[in-house]
Image (cartoon, rainbow, N blue to C red):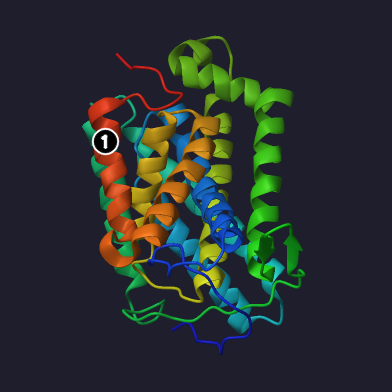
Amino acid sequence: MIGRRAPEEPSGHITNAHSASETVGPTLANIVVTGCLYTLIAIGLTMVYGMLRVLHIVHAGVFAVGAAVGLLIFTTAPVGFWPSLLGAMLAAGVMGVAIYYVGYRWVLDAPRGTPLLVSIGLFITVQSLLEKEFLIGPHVEGFDAATGLPAFTLGGFAFTPIQTAIVVSTAVVCAAVWLLLNRSRLGLSWRALSEDMNMARSLGVPTERAVAINMFLGSAMAGLAGVLVAVYENAVSAHMGEVVAYKAFVVVVLGGLGSIWGAAVAAFILAAFEIGISTTFGGLFPRDAIGFAVLILILLFMPTGLFGKRLD
């Protein structure tokens, strides 16, 4: 069972309602940080959907596993936050590749509902395993780690060390994804496969290699997000991926299915809606309910999202 550590630095909240902020600055900083976390989760999910056309529900399970592995490394090995984070990303990436070869690879040509059922089944399996006492167990474990980064203030924005780590990590990930998509042969392969996998395969695109790398990197982002959220909230649990699963789905649908940069924009829109409404109206509108309301409105009035295109 993974151990608990005593708190050392302030934590934040991604899933719980925030109390009313006294100034605009902290609220805007909270929106930025929450938007960054949603972005990290949603970009990896969108990468998988864009190529495989699979609603990758088990991505939330990979997120939870990343948090658990990061905590395990941090509490059992003589290393700090950043090596634990890298170890969690590596474990999550390997898990993503395994999910493809064990599950998705055999059902990609099946009706669309089949890969979705496989993904849901894998998510339930992962969650059930994490509930075992030799892993996380049915309780919540603390994960308080010092990032080594400084707190800083920019204008009215004040960021704690973990918030700084979240913003910097998101900026690095977004820059890396942009470079991969637009300045590499791998990105060209991904774009070709997302348009027509069978045609790309017939033209010599190394499909298996490209998909495996896509799953590895997308899942590594989930592991990164899992550790950052766990430290931000000082909490790791077997069920921490449940809310993440539907919020990531809201972001992906709002941005447009398959649109990576649409997901990034939608992440900050959802964060602004949630924090703005919950801050203004207090407990009248719980944050998680706001996400559901946004999803319903999208499906009713903008089913293709902000930057998506209709699939036949």
Q: In this image, 293 relative to 66: left or right?
A: left
The amino acid at mark 1 is: Leu
Of residue 258 and residue 38, the one placed in the foreground of this image is 38
Which residue corresponds to the image point at 52% horizontal and 55% vertical from the top-left?
Answer: 34
Neighbor class of circle 1 (other Cα within 10 Å; few <14, some 14-19, many 20+) is few
Which residue corresponds to the image point at 53% horizontal and 46% vertical from the top-left?
Answer: 39
Q: Is residue 117 above or below residue 211?
A: below
Which residue corresponds to the image point at 41% horizontal and 37% vertical from the top-left?
Answer: 252
Measured as percent of width and height from the top left, residue 138 is found at: 31, 79
Measured as percent of width and height from the top left, residue 219 is found at: 52, 48
Of residue 83 and residue 301, the one placed in the foreground of this image is 301
Q: Which residue is mark 1?
A: 297
Residue 2 shows up from this direction:
yes
Q: In this image, 114 relative to 171: left or right?
A: left
Measured as percent of width and height from the top left, residue 71 is found at: 55, 75
**Count of marks overlaid on the render:** 1
Q: Secondary structure at mark 1?
A: helix
Of residue 293 and residue 1, the one placed in the foreground of this image is 293
Of residue 85 and residue 148, the one placed in the foreground of this image is 148
Q: Quadrant of residue 270?
A: top left
Q: Quadrant of the C terminus?
A: top left
Q: Residue furthest bottom?
A: 6
Residue 93 shows up from this direction:
no
Measured as percent of width and height from the top left, residue 266 is found at: 47, 38
Q: Quadrant of the N terminus?
A: bottom left
Q: Is residue 61 above or below residue 260?
A: below
Q: In this image, 27 relative to 184: left or right?
A: left
